[in-house]
Image (tube, grey):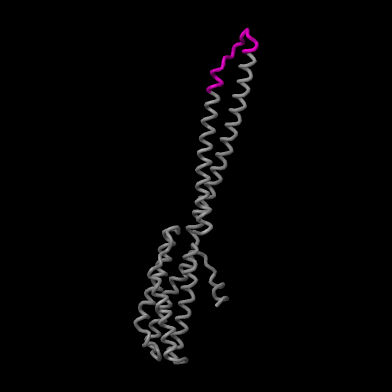
Amino acid sequence: MSVLDWIFIIGIALSIVALLGSGYFLVQFFHKRRLLKKLPNKKFKNKKKNRKIARKKRQLINQKKKSIRLFWVMSFVTVVLAGGISYLSYYQSMNLTTGDSDSVVKGYYLLRDFEDQLIVARDKSDDEEKLQKNIRYLATSMASYGTKKASDINSEEGQITLNRYYNSIKQLGMNASTQTKNFFGNQALVDSFLADIKKAQDYEKLTFDYYKVNESAFKEEK
C-alpha cells in the first residue's frame, strides 16, 4: 500500500476513536447532571453533612464541565478528521495511484519507442533482424497491458478513461506480435500501425487531461 493508503486507514481509525470519545463524554455529561439533580438543595442541621453535599456538588459540576469540554474537543477532532478523509478520498479518486502512474509512464515510452522502430523498419535504416527483435519485445510489453486494470480507488470516469488507454496499448501489442516479420520495408503495414498508435495516443491524451499529467516532463526526459 502507498503512503496515502496508510494515511487514509489511520485517519479513519482515528476519526472512529474520536467519534466514540465524543459520545462517551456526552454520556458522562448527562450522567453527572443527573447525579447533580439528585443531590438535595435544602440545608440540613448537620453542618458536616451540608459540607459533604457541597463538596460533592462542586466535584460533579467540575466533572460535568470537563465532560462537555472534552465532548466539544472530540467532536471538533472528529469533524476535522472526517473532512481530511473526505478530501483525501477525493484527491485519490482524481489522481493516479502509484501502480497506475508507473503503467502510464511505461505506456508513454512504449508507444514512442514502437513508433520509432516502425519508422526505422519502414525506411530500412537498420538491421532487419535487430529491428524484428526490438519490435517483438515492444509488442510483448504492450500486449501485457491486457492484465492491467485501473485502480478502483479512482473515480468511475477516471477508471473508464484509464482502462480504455490500457486496452488500446494491449490491442496494439497483440496485433503487432503477429506482424513482427512483416514491417521491414512495408510502408502500407507501417502506416496502418502508425494510425493505430495515433488512436492510442488520443486515449493517452484523454488520460493525461483527466489526471492532469504533465506531458512536457515526459518529453524532456525522453
Quick one: which residue is furthest to the top in this view? 45
Question: From what the image shows, is residue 18 above or below residue 10?
Answer: above
Q: Which residues are magenta?
A: 34-49
Q: How many discs appear?
A: 0
In the rendered image, residue 143 lying in the magenta stretch gets the answer no
Q: Quadrant of residue 152?
A: bottom left
Question: From what the image shows, is residue 175 above or below residue 166?
Answer: below
Q: What residue is at 52 percent from the left and 34 percent from the top?
A: 24
Image coordinates of residue 106 in percent, x first then y, are: 48, 73
Q: Nearer the viewer, residue 9 or 170?
A: 9
Q: What residue is at 55 percent from the left and 76 percent from the top?
A: 219
Image coordinates of residue 13 in percent, x first then y, are: 50, 46
Image coordinates of residue 70 in percent, x first then y, are: 58, 35
Q: What residue is at 50 percent from the left and 48 percent from the top?
A: 12
Image quadrant holding the C terminus, namely bottom right
Image coordinates of residue 25 in percent, x first then y, are: 54, 33
Q: Nearer the viewer, residue 47 or 165?
A: 47
In the rendered image, residue 39 lying in the magenta stretch gets the answer yes
Asked whether, in this view, residue 161 is left or right of residue 52, the answer is left
